[in-house]
């Protein structure tokens, strides 16, 4: 299917290009993250935008899908200036149609600061306006996302909250409702938040990998200590066995959480996995053929269409109800994800097809 709109950007000062793809508008709006990476590819951005459309539809959200990227190294000295100019150039779309969120190598805090510098009060106003909320009322509710819950902002926890809900729902489907043994690929915002939330409810993180190493402890890693020593998405080497980063994919665990990259592993690795289930926290964490192979091998997979929708569901909480406390937003995310995952897993077992196959077929037929 062809995307609705593709905007190519060239920075007027630095040798940097970028792209925004709007796959679909629903009620005049779309949502999707902005990533920063030197290898941003327009075709991949289009695929991710299409995936965002499916993700919104998986939860019947009145929003289409989009994705954007800037081709620049994350540590480029002009990163901030380039980001501000990009947002300023796309301000008319942001004000009316595009709800912007974080993605690879970006955070909501950074994006919102840059937006404020160019006169955009909120990167989510388009959604509030589409739901009939006055800007002042939407901004009042949106302030809940900046508030803290146990030392973390709601912004930082809204995506990991969906991952926790999906992981726990998967555990129940595996007849392991408590004490789940979890392995996590990725120690950035998603992986770190998921580790913290899962640790708080009694799950054991037995393996955790960044891009350099995998830390392993059969009785569970000290998540709090690792988070305290984490720097730029990399874990400290504390009292744990250290293995190559890719070892996390073959960790002995109940659930493997993929929270780092797209297409995390190839089909050939499937027979060597030692997990009972996989949660795709990263966008397009597995290729469709890998998901099919996992399904055939009896490994349950919660696709990113369900597990990585926390950002959109947190915004839904702002217009679908009237949350009073920051924790209300996270509770809304977890309720929605748990119910949807359980429903899809039930249907998957009934017809013998993978969750992604069922979701994609139903969504694309609309």
Image (spheres, rainbow, N blue to C red):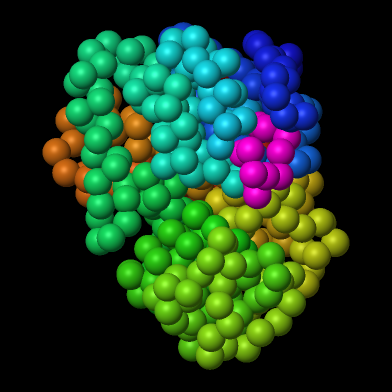
Main SS of the magenta part reads: loop
Is any atom of residue 233 visible in this view?
yes
Residue 123 in sight in this render: no
Q: Residue at x 45, y 70 (%)?
A: 227
- Quarter where residue 210 is shown: bottom right
Q: Is residue 240 above or below residue 355?
A: below
Does the magenta-highlighted stretch encompass residue 348?
A: no
Q: Quadrant of the C terminus?
A: top right
Q: Position of residue 195 (x, y in %)?
A: 45, 66
Please tell me which residue lies in front, 237 or 346: 237
Estimate the x, y position of residue 59 in percent, counting from the top left.
44, 32
Q: Position of residue 62 (x, y in %)?
A: 42, 19
Quadrant into which the N terminus falls: top right
In this picture, residue 180 sits left or right of residue 50: left
Residue for point 65% across, 20% down: 21
Instruction: State left or right for residue 182 relative to residue 211.
Output: left
Query: To which quarter of the image does residue 329 belong?
Result: top left
Which residue is drawn at the image coordinates 18% and 36% (left, top)?
323
Residue toward you, 233 or 345? 233
Name the outermost residue toward the left.
324
Q: What's the residue at 67%, 32% (across, down)?
A: 70
* Frontmost residue, 222 versus 180: 222
Left or right: 108 as drawn, with respect to 300:
left
User: Can you give x and y, in whole percent of width and height, for residue 167 in the image?
Assistant: 47, 59
Report the side of 307 relative to 104 (left or right).
left
Q: Which residues are magenta?
A: 69-79
């Amino acid at each position: 299917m062809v995307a609705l709109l593709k905007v190519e950007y060239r920075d007027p000062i630095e040798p940097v290009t970028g792209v925004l793809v709007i796959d679909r508008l629903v009620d005049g709006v779309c949502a999707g993250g902005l990533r920063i990476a030197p290898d941003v590819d327009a075709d991949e951005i289009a695929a991710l935008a299409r995936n965002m459309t499916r993700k919104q539809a998986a939860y019947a959200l009145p929003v289409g899908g989009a994705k954007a990227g800037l081709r620049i190294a994350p540590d480029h000295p002009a990163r901030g200036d380039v980001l501000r100019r990009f947002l300023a150039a796309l301000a008319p779309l942001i004000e009316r149609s595009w709800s912007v969120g974080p993605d690879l190598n970006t955070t909501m805090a950074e994006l919102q600061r840059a937006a404020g510098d160019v006169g955009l009060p909120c990167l989510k106003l388009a959604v509030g306006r589409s739901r009939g909320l006055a800007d002042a009322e939407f901004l009042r509710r949106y302030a809940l996302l900046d508030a803290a819950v146990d030392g973390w902002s709601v912004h930082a926890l809204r995506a990991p909250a969906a991952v926790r809900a999906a992981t726990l729902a998967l555990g129940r489907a595996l007849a392991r409702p408590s004490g789940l043994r979890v392995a996590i690929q990725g120690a950035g915002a998603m992986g770190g938040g998921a580790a913290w939330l899962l640790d708080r409810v009694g799950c054991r993180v037995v393996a955790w990998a960044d891009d350099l190493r995998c830390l392993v402890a059969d009785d569970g890693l000290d998540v709090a200590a690792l988070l305290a020593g984490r720097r730029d998405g990399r874990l400290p080497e504390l009292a744990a066995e250290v293995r190559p980063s890719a070892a996390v994919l073959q960790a002995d665990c109940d659930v493997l959480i993929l929270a780092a990259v797209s297409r995390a592993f190839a089909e050939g690795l499937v027979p060597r996995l030692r997990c009972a289930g996989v949660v795709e926290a990263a966008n397009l964490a597995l290729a469709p053929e890998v998901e099919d192979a996992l399904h055939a091998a009896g490994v349950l997979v919660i696709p990113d269409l369900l597990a990585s929708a926390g950002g959109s569901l947190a915004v839904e909480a702002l217009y679908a109800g009237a949350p009073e406390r920051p924790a209300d937003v996270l509770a809304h995310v977890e309720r929605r994800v748990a119910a949807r995952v359980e429903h899809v897993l039930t249907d998957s077992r009934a017809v013998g097809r993978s969750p992604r196959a069922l979701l994609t077929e139903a969504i694309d037929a609309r």
